[in-house]
């Protein structure tokens, strides 16, 4: 099979929101407000058919891995760094040059890759991220990157605001670096060392834990028989297996990369801008269409179109109305009567921390301290509650995580009864899985898929959302934590959950648009993620004052 990485938003696989066939956006931001038009939607409804009426076939690890084959790097032989993709030698040029660009127009950019000697590349697989932005307006949006598999790429943008627009195309990793990352990732489970602490009274013993330990040594196995999730620790000298108390981890010294491969993943070779053969693009308001009521909230649009954009440093969704959910009044109105479960890693924990910080009337049922595995807050009048709980092992943290306070999300989902539409679940996993072979993450996703199906069967009204991974620091050891790993895991999440009745919050697109490479974005950015989530949860708000206008 011809394999090639299609970075950022694969126009073949990746979808931004649910339930649309063709979507064309014409936006006018004027004093009368934000103007949107659309060419054609598959459906005007905002909810997918009832899960009871939609058959969901069994899905296996092999099914998911096979679906990702087209996104894996090609196997190529290179003799030196001079043969690898060079951002300095490569260029980005405009296609279909127009005399005038209007809001709603499509802007196509062609990227031609060359190696360090200036020779054209003849195969794809480079990891490219692209965005348009207007710094003075604090506006930005992503572009959809299509790998033409011949050394060239097409990046498609939709022009969503008026003014001077800059185009930025970043070479995150050359195809040769991606090939090295993939080989290293699939090689073993040993990039992270986990230490289990066993406690009995005042006595403590520590042993190594992991997914694949030396089978010749005695082990304590901790396995969920139903879901097949398991890990093990070497048996402590004297204490029993059930006395395991906490676990911590650190990066295992060493690398599976050659010296030449490692050089491709140094800081000055990651996220480098490809030079443009054109200047900034002047976008005009060519016509004005009367602004009516906000259209119905939809879950999916054409993946080649952005699902939203930043304007004045706030996210504006093209799927649902986010503007009002930056105000405390609208947030409280949306949360009223609801029980919300946040489940996953610390990037989801940021959501509950944000909601707590802006609502001073919350009182803590369980105080938040560093390293804690769960947080629960209840509105003083008992109108709503929100809680967060960390996913189960693996965790990559120097802090000691208490195993008695953790459980698999699939098991936590099983504790939710038939509670109806006022029960909401948000799941966000991925960052702690990047350092392991992809099959491990896929197995966890499939366990979650089965649990979601069980929950929706007994409680069809329960709303479920998947928070996709966001980008992280470019300096985070790329062999273990590169955003290419996160990109691939997001594609896996789309595959595993895409046919279920769930909503996606695309934190990846938002962080790429904002050029934010931080594992834990600042509160201003988290406000936009939460606004996107609430706009899907409560999609008929009355307040329109917070919509960005020019």
Image (cartoon, grey):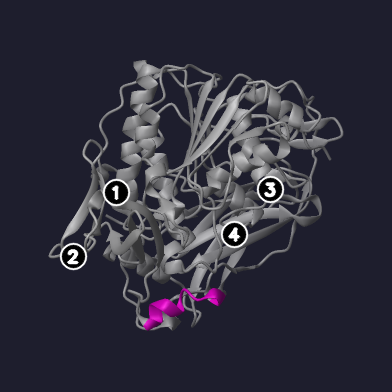
Q: Report the label total.
A: 4
Contact between labelled residues 2 and 1, with CB atoms less than 8 Å apart: no
Cα distance in 3D space between marks 4 and 1: 27 Å
Residue 154 pos. (x, y %):
53, 55
The 10 Å Cα crowd at callout 1, few under 14, some 14 to 19, many 20 or more, is some
Residue 196, by quadrant, is bottom left
Cα distance in 3D space between marks 2 and 4: 37 Å
Q: Nearer the viewer, residue 529 or 194?
A: 194
Residue 152 in the magenta stretch? The answer is no
Q: Quickly name the residue at label 4.
A: 517
Contact between labelled residues 3 and 4, with CB atoms less than 8 Å apart: no
Q: Magenta segment, which residues?
A: 259-268
Q: Quickly name the residue at label 2.
A: 214
Helix, strand or loop at disc 3? helix
* Camera-nearest label, 1 or 3: 3
Residue 291, by quadrant, is top right
Q: Which of marks 4 and 1 is nearer the N terminus?
A: 1
Q: Quickly name the residue at label 3.
A: 523
Q: Earlier in the sequence, mark 2 or mark 4?
A: 2
Cα distance in 3D space between marks 1 and 3: 35 Å
């Amino acid at each position: 099979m011809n394999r090639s990485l299609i970075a950022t938003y694969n126009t073949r696989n990746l979808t931004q929101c649910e339930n649309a066939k063709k979507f064309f956006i014409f936006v006018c931001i004027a004093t009368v407000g934000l103007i949107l038009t659309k060419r054609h939607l598959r459906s005007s409804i905002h909810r997918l058919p009832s899960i009871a009426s939609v058959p969901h076939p069994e899905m296996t690890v092999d099914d998911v891995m096979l679906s990702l084959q087209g996104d894996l790097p090609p196997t190529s032989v290179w003799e030196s760094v001079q043969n690898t993709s060079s951002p300095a030698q490569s260029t980005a040029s405009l296609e279909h040059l127009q005399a005038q660009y209007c809001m709603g127009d499509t802007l196509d950019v062609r990227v031609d890759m060359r190696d360090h000697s200036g020779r054209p590349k003849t195969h794809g697989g480079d990891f490219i991220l692209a965005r348009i932005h207007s710094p003075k307006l604090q506006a930005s949006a992503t572009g959809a990157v299509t790998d033409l598999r011949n050394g060239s790429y097409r990046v498609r943008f939709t022009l969503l605001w008026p003014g001077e627009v800059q185009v930025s195309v970043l070479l995150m990793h050359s195809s040769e670096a991606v090939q090295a990352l993939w080989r290293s990732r699939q090689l073993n489970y040993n990039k992270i060392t986990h230490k289990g602490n066993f406690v009995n009274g005042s006595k403590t013993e520590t042993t190594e834990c992991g997914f694949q330990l030396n089978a010749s040594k005695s082990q304590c196995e901790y396995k969920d028989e139903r879901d097949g999730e398991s890990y093990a620790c070497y048996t402590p000298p004297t204490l029993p297996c059930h006395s395991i108390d906490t676990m911590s981890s650190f990066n295992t010294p060493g690398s599976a990369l050659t010296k030449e491969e490692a050089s491709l993943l140094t800081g000055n070779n990651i996220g480098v801008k490809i030079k443009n053969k054109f200047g900034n693009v002047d976008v005009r308001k060519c016509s004005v269409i009367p602004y009516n009521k906000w259209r119905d909230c939809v879950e999916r649009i054409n993946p080649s179109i952005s699902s939203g954009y930043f304007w004045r440093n706030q996210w504006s969704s093209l799927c649902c109305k986010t503007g009002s959910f930056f105000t405390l009044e609208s947030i409280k109105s949306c949360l009223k009567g609801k029980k919300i479960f946040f489940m996953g890693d610390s990037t989801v924990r940021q959501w509950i921390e944000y909601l707590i910080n802006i609502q001073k009337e919350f009182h803590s049922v369980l105080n938040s301290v560093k390293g804690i595995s769960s947080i629960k807050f209840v509105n003083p009048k008992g109108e709503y509650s929100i809680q967060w709980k960390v996913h189960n092992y693996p965790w990559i943290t120097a802090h000691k995580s208490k195993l008695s306070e953790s459980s698999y999300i699939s098991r936590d989902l099983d504790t939710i009864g038939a509670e109806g539409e006022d029960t909401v679940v948000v799941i966000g996993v991925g960052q702690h899985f990047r350092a392991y072979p992809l099959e491990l993450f896929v197995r966890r996703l499939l366990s979650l898929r089965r649990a979601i199906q069980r929950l929706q069967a007994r409680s069809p009204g329960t709303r479920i959302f998947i928070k996709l991974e966001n980008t992280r620091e470019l300096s985070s050891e790329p062999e273990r934590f590169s955003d290419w790993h996160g990109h691939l895991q997001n594609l896996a999440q789309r595959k595993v959950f895409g046919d279920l009745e769930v909503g996606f919050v695309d934190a990846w697109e938002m962080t790429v648009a904002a050029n934010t490479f931080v594992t834990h974005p600042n509160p201003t950015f988290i406000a936009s993620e939460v606004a996107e989530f609430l706009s899907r949860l409560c999609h008929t708000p009355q307040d329109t004052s917070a919509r960005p206008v020019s």
